[in-house]
């Protein structure tokens, strides 16, 4: 019973927040604080709250399409909080438990110091790179994220389009609100499909086959999550996926709980596409994965949404890079917010990084154009970092630019 009431609370807040999202941000901000206090009072007294009106059962996401002026990707979180319903915002923004990992992701990136080289006579920086045969405008790609319809009406279509317009790669989540075929058609840019396995292999096989047929060029197998990310705030707000935003491909947000190397083999057998292992946090696992023919490693702690207490990915990266020893590309995600963060990850051996929440905030605030603005901003920052550091190509970024003290 309390579960039903709290879901209503979330949806009621959703409707209020969505109405606010159609307004300019300054006005939306005032409405959003109403939304927060409404949700707070209901959450504090669930047994006496009146059921929300039927219309509130429809989640209405932001719809605006606009270019964003972005000072820092960090600014986007506060702006998105103003226009998204509290439950949806908490689902996107929060980390698990005490949020130790989500904080360390940032703290450890900030702790690293860089040392530029001056008077080296380098040409202007070129950010382009190649990852598993895909030509990218920058070594930054979109991480797979579920239920993007929470952020914007265009959902995965807007995010894929914006990423493609920035000239880089979109990873589609199994837990998407749009079909594999719709997302494939939305971008001419490179695209990978992320798989969460079902208990039954039939639906998983079908997803893999559809992704290959639709033109996705690699499969990202996520090994560190089994259900939607739950934080203290999503529990307090009774967050669940709104019924009018179905997960159209997977039909469920709950996935196979017991995973082993036989599952990796199943995916490798079922698709001809290269398989990337996402969620690698130890050198041992990375070494075994390479031995078993995995095409790339994605070092990730799921943006601090999984096991709280896992170290920052930038801390784990060097050991994994050493274990992989250049045999396959290494991608890193979790906490990347700045061009200098990208530079640091590349200097410590990553071939590329993936961007998570900032893409969803850009989507919420400006649709596909907002996503493109996020990439334009971080690319400009990386370009500036390369220019000052004295490197002209992505391949030249190495540990010589890390200050060891
Ligand atoms: C995720 N992430 C994720 N990963 C995945 O493999 N499949 C998924 O469906 C999802 N869903 C998802 C939803 C939301 C709202 C977020 C924020 C994240 C994890 C994602 O791919 C990536 O690892 C982190 O988001 C990277 O950290 P930052 O950049 O968000 O700090």
Image (cartoon, helix red, strand yellow):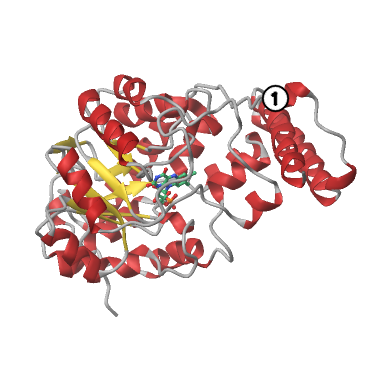
Which percent across, then down, holds residue 154?
A: 48, 23
- The structure residue drawn at horizontal position 36% and vertical position 44%, both measured from the top left corner, is 196
Which percent across, then down, holds residue 190?
A: 23, 31
Which percent across, then down, holds residue 138?
A: 24, 41
Task: Name the quadrant containing residue 259.
Answer: bottom left
**Neighbours of disc 1 within 10 Å: few (<14), some (14-19), many (20+):** some
- The structure residue drawn at horizontal position 46% and vertical position 29%, both measured from the top left corner, is 177
- The structure residue drawn at horizontal position 22% and vertical position 36%, both measured from the top left corner, is 137
The quarter of the rendered structure image containing the C terminus is: bottom left
Q: Nearer the viewer, residue 362 or 257?
A: 257
Which residue appears farthest toward the right when viewing the image? 48
Task: Name the quadrant containing residue 291.
Answer: bottom left
Q: Nearer the viewer, residue 320 or 405?
A: 320
**Number of numbered labels in the structure image:** 1
Side of 88 relative to 40 (left or right): left
The residue at which mark 1 appears reads as 19
Side of 269 relative to 32 (left or right): left
Q: Is residue 18 above or below residue 346?
A: above
- Can residue 69 be seen here? The reply is no
Task: State the SS at label 1.
Answer: helix
- Can residue 224 be seen here? The reply is yes
Q: Nearer the viewer, residue 255 or 94?
A: 255
């Amino acid at each position: 019973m309390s579960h039903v009431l709290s879901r209503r609370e979330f949806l009621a807040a959703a409707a209020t927040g969505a109405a606010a999202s159609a307004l300019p941000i300054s006005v939306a901000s005032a409405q959003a604080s109403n939304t927060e206090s409404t949700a707070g009072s209901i959450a504090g007294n669930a047994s006496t709250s009146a059921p929300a009106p039927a219309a509130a059962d429809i989640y209405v996401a932001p719809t605006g399409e606009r270019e964003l002026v972005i000072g820092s990707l960090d600014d986007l979180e506060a702006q998105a909080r103003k226009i998204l319903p509290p439950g949806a915002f908490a689902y996107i923004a929060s980390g698990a438990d005490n949020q130790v990992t989500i904080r360390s992701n940032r703290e450890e990136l900030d702790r690293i110091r860089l040392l530029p080289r001056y008077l080296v006579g380098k040409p202007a920086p070129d950010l382009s790179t190649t990852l598993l045969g895909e030509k990218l405008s920058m070594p930054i790609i979109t991480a797979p994220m579920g239920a993007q319809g929470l952020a914007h009406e265009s959902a995965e279509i807007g995010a894929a389009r914006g990423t493609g317009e920035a000239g880089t790669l979109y990873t589609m989540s199994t837990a998407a609100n749009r079909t594999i075929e719709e997302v494939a058609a939305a971008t001419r840019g490179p695209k990978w499909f992320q798989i969460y396995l079902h208990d039954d292999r039939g639906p998983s096989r079908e997803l893999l086959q559809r992704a290959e047929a639709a033109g996705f060029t690699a499969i990202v197998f996520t090994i560190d999550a089994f259900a939607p990310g739950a934080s203290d705030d999503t529990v307090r707000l009774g967050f669940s996926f709104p019924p009018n935003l179905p997960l159209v491909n997977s039909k469920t947000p709950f996935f196979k709980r017991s995973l082993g190397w036989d599952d990796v083999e199943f995916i490798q057998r079922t698709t001809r596409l290269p398989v990337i292992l996402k969620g690698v946090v130890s050198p041992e696992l990375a070494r075994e994965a390479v031995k078993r023919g995995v095409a790339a490693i994605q070092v990730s702690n799921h943006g601090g949404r999984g096991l709280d207490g896992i170290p920052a990915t930038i801390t784990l990266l060097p050991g994994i890079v050493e274990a992989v020893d250049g045999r396959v590309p290494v991608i890193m995600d979790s906490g990347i917010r700045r061009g200098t963060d990208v530079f640091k990850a590349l200097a410590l051996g990553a071939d590329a990084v993936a961007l998570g929440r900032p893409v969803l905030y850009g989507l919420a605030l400006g649709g596909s154009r907002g996503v493109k603005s996020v990439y334009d901003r971080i690319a400009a920052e990386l370009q500036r970092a390369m220019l000052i550091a004295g490197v002209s190509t992505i391949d030249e970024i190495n540990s010589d630019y890390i200050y060891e003290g």
